Image (cartoon, coloured by chain):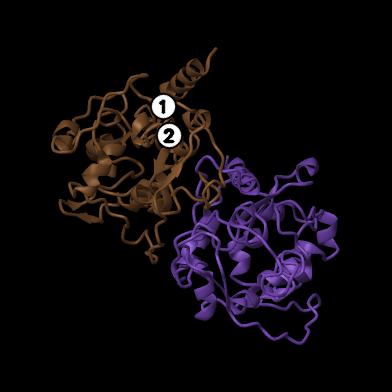
Amino acid sequence: MNRLQIILLISLAVGFPLSASGAVKSYDSYGRVVIGNYSPKSGMAKVVFDHWLHRAQFTCRVCHVDIGFLMEGGGTRMKAADNMKGYYCGACHNGKMQTYEGPIFKACSTPPNPDDVSRCDRCHSFGKNVQKKYDFAKFTAKMPKASLGNGVDWEKAESSGLINPKDNVQGVSIIKPAMPVQKDFSLDTKSSWMGDILFSHKKHSKWNGCELCHPDIFLGVSRGATKYNMMQIYGGEYCGVCHLNVAFPLQDCSRCHLKPVK
Amino acid sequence: MFAWAALIIVAGLACAEGGVKKRKPLPYEFGSVVIGNFSQSAGLSPVIFDHWLHRSKYTCRVCHVDIGFGMTAGSTKIRAADNRKGYYCGACHNGKSRFDKKTIFEACSGEDSKKCGICHFTGRNPLREQDFYKFAEKMPKERFGNGINWEQAEGKGLINPIDQLEGISIPRNALAVQKDFSLPVKTEGMPEIIFSHKKHTIWNGCELCHPDIFLGVKKGATKYSMVELFQGKYCGVCHDKVAFPQTDCQRCHAGSLQK
């Protein structure tokens, strides 16, 4: 088996179970996570969480650092009780936190109020035909286009001011002085036919701060201290923690391999 | 279930290899240690030890220097017999010592089997969680760890950790505390570290860190890198597991910018 076949096999093996709709993802289902650690046991449908709606409003850091969601579907293992205590979804979905549209709906209550089924359905919607409040096509109509992922160039959407993701949540985030951002740098590739990677800390820290990636995913903070290869990335490690499922997918080679081959 | 989750956290911290995101423990779980060297072979559930409860009442030094607990989960290899003789947990948990006018329960006496479950219990304990919330409510907030800024809690007098135990600690004359100093960093653009001996000695005295963890007592004598720290050495012995996690960059990198 050559290397390409191995990569294809790995991406299928990793991609298939993570995707709710099969190996090929549609724009609206990219970044979809189905969470069902405890729901079926309590007679509820599994939760369908779409990243696109949340990432248009908040940075990745807020949820994955301050609130503490893990980076793999079902990994956090939150319970309704956690949400009700103000952890995880309940950090914002508490029926109190205000947005420009009024308070954010409350997540989870036990026992579920029979009048509240439509509220449960907003998240516990797996296998149900639930009319969502926000329509993907309408929401993303004005966004800059990309060919893969959600079909949206989120980086441009942010830099052009079309979205303005919040980096802190009142009562959850504790704001610290910003750290200086390292300059962009290039990472040498191992293959002669492949252009070098241009890595931008600036673009990444906008969404992630320092703490989403360091030290858990990239142990070293000095350049070259952490060694990894494309196989590991396709296996969901390093860059692949985000760039397989939520951030633009790895198939968009030239978004990272930017430098022309010499 | 919880036991496994806790074991995974502890194991995860012990071998920080990178590559994937680790679970962030909930505030009441942070600093939990699962101890099960001998419990299971004696037919008991392993012990879950909560640091938050003890550190709100005692300094780190009392337990890790005077009593002599190790700094990694399970490394002390405590036996029930040790506790009964007044070592380790039994130094205070002897049914005689008092805290806040109450007698501290006796550990491992074998007389009252109902008492075993106070420590030998790995299920989710809603009462302990409630106790935590009640305690944490009044404490200054912090982003990681227990969600408590322990340093401020002590500084403001909200907690007053005991540093000497009758019958165990032998008081010595306090040594002079070194002034705060800055540690230069290697990565360009990273703010310098401001290290405060004063903040550390309140909890640790000299002997918790020197000479075991930091062999040298002169500035610059011990060389280490962030990678080693993240792997649980040097500062990482405490910070990440019990003291505030190292992901809270700005709490140490608080100095002026490197040029």
> How dense is the environment of label 1, judged by Cα within 10 Å: few (below 14), some, or many (20 and up)?
some
User: Closer to the camera, A239 or B58?
Assistant: A239
> Does residue B119 appear to the left or right of A211 in the view shown?
right
Which quadrant of the figure contains the N terminus of chain B?
top right
Q: Kindly state the secondary structure of the residue where label 2 is placed.
A: loop
User: Closer to the camera, B105 or B79?
Assistant: B79
Q: Are marks 1 and 2 on the same chain?
A: yes
> Does residue A146 appear to the left or right of B85 in the view shown?
left
> Disc number at residue A18?
1
Please report contact status of discs 1 and 2: CB closer than 8 Å, yes or no.
Answer: yes
User: Which chain hosts label 1?
Assistant: A
Q: Which residue is mark 2?
A: A73
Q: Quadrant of residue A147?
A: top left
Q: Is residue A40 above or below residue B255?
A: above
The answer for how far apart the CA atoms under marks 1 and 2 are is: 7 Å
In this structure image, what is the colour of chain B? purple
In this structure image, what is the colour of chain A? brown
Q: Is residue B60 above or below residue B202?
A: above
User: Closer to the camera, A119 or B66?
Assistant: B66
User: Which chain hosts label 2?
Assistant: A
Q: Kindly state the secondary structure of the residue where label 1 is placed.
A: helix
User: Closer to the camera, B77 or B240?
Assistant: B240
Residue A26 placement (x, y as % from top left): 27, 24
Q: Residue at x 19, y 48 (%)?
A: A160
> Disc number at residue A250?
none
> How dense is the environment of label 2, judged by Cα within 10 Å: few (below 14), some, or many (20 and up)?
some
Question: Amino acid type of disc 1?
Answer: Leu
Residue A114 showing in the rendered view = no
